[in-house]
Image (spheres, rainbow, N blue to C red):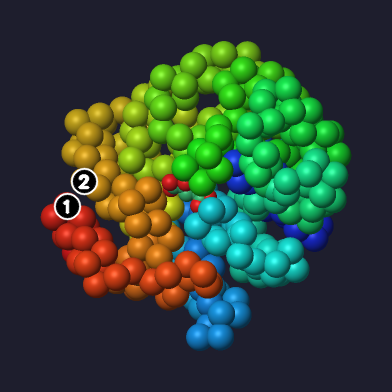
Amino acid sequence: MLCVRLWRALTPLCRTGHCTVWTRTQSHKAAARLDLAGIYPPIATPFTAKEDVDFQKLEENLQKYAKIPFKGLVVQGSNGEYPYLTEEEQVEVVRAVRRSLPADKLLMAGSGCESTRATVRLTENLVVTPCFYKAKMGSCALIQHYTKVADSSPVPVVLYSVPANTGMEVPTDAVVQLAQHPNIVGLKDSGGDITRIGLIVHKTKMQDFQVLAGSAGFLMAAYCVGAVGGVCALANVLGGELCELERLCVSGRWEEARVLQQRLIEPNTTVTRKLGVPALKQAMEWFGFHGGACRSPMQPLTEAETQQLRQDFSSNGWL
Ligand SMILES: O=C(O)C(=O)C[C@H](O)C(=O)O
């Protein structure tokens, strides 16, 4: 789940399955008109040497992100290490980000739990997609789950399909059915299957429903088939460049977009699928942000991995 702007206490989160968005009005109809178009970094969580959340460093990152033309931020996404944070910490981080974020920026916060009941409760605070019993999480179970969450959520919900982390995706037929719910306003799809993204855009075109690319490697392709933006881990590092890619796509400058997109593919693959969050945080350090270590048990990069990471950025002209 993800949330936007204002809120009462917390934003619903998104994970595998869904995200919630908070609006000023909290009215379902008004929520459905929410414009999600643009680029969002799913922000990383900096920690102190004792592995406590480092709110000072978080704030310093936020001040730097405020200078980049993002549509908003995602808090407690996969790269925020949400599974390693307590519920209280998740809520506290979302609150801190909301306090710091300019009022015109959207805030989406993840809030999924394994049971529908717990998800409903946390969506009043935060929410996520259930994947532990993934063999049992078919369309029927997920439709029932998200419908109950969206029915009770005080803020709009964005579905979040991230199969690399959850081992399952929200099935296309479930997304299409859930898109009819007045409080479900979009999907963030990290799977990278462009035919699926295009099909979902096509099948939901009569609904007030928007699709966001869930990773930078296929951002341009996603725009081509009708996505309206992206939630991209790489935006923590190359946020200005991803916003530039958005601008090129939206203005139809496809040749320039293609050149930029191609240079982003390798660094993106490395900080997402290949080396993951420790690599994202290392790259953030190189680009002037606070990344630092992950919370245990996530291990730091080895020397060879660090070299690989550097190579994937430098060979594409970023370092
Ligand atoms: O951290 C998240 O949450 C993301 O959505 C990141 C995304 O999966 C990516 O590949 O960039």
Residue 53: image quadrant is bottom right
Residue in view at x 75 percent, y 68 percent: 88
The three-letter code of the residue at mark 2 reads Arg
Residue in view at x 57 percent, y 53 percent: 77
User: Does the rendering let one see residue 4?
Assistant: no
Residue in view at x 39 percent, y 51 percent: 272
Disc marking residue 198 = none
Disc 2 under 8 Å from ligand 1? The reply is: no
Query: As displayed, is residue 205 above or below residue 16?
Result: above
Real-space Cα distance between discs 2 and 1? Answer: 5 Å
Query: Pointer 2: what residue?
Result: 263
Q: Is 253 on the left or on the right of 218, as rendered?
A: left
In which quadrant will I find the N terminus?
top right
Position in image of residue 65 (x %, y %): 46, 63
Position in image of residue 160 (x %, y %): 59, 39
Characterize the local packing of mark 2: few (<14), some (14-19) or many (20 or more) Cα atoms within 10 angstroms: some
Q: Which one is earlier in the sequence, the residue at label 2 or at label 1?
A: 2
Query: Across the whole image, how many numbered discs are drawn on residues?
Result: 2
The residue lying toward the viewer, choosing from 228 and 52, is: 52
Identify the secondary structure beneath mark 2.
helix
Position in image of residue 120 (x %, y %): 82, 45
The three-letter code of the residue at mark 1 reads Asn
Characterize the local packing of mark 1: few (<14), some (14-19) or many (20 or more) Cα atoms within 10 angstroms: some
Position in image of residue 25 (x %, y %): 80, 44
Identify the secondary structure beneath mark 1.
loop
Q: Is 213 on the left or on the right of 255, as rendered?
A: right
Q: Is 138 on the left or on the right of 43, as rendered?
A: right
Q: Are marks 2 and 1 in contact (CB under 8 Å)?
A: yes
Query: Pointer 1: what residue?
Result: 316
The residue lying toward the viewer, choosing from 143 and 225, is: 143
Residue in view at x 38 percent, y 61 percent: 280
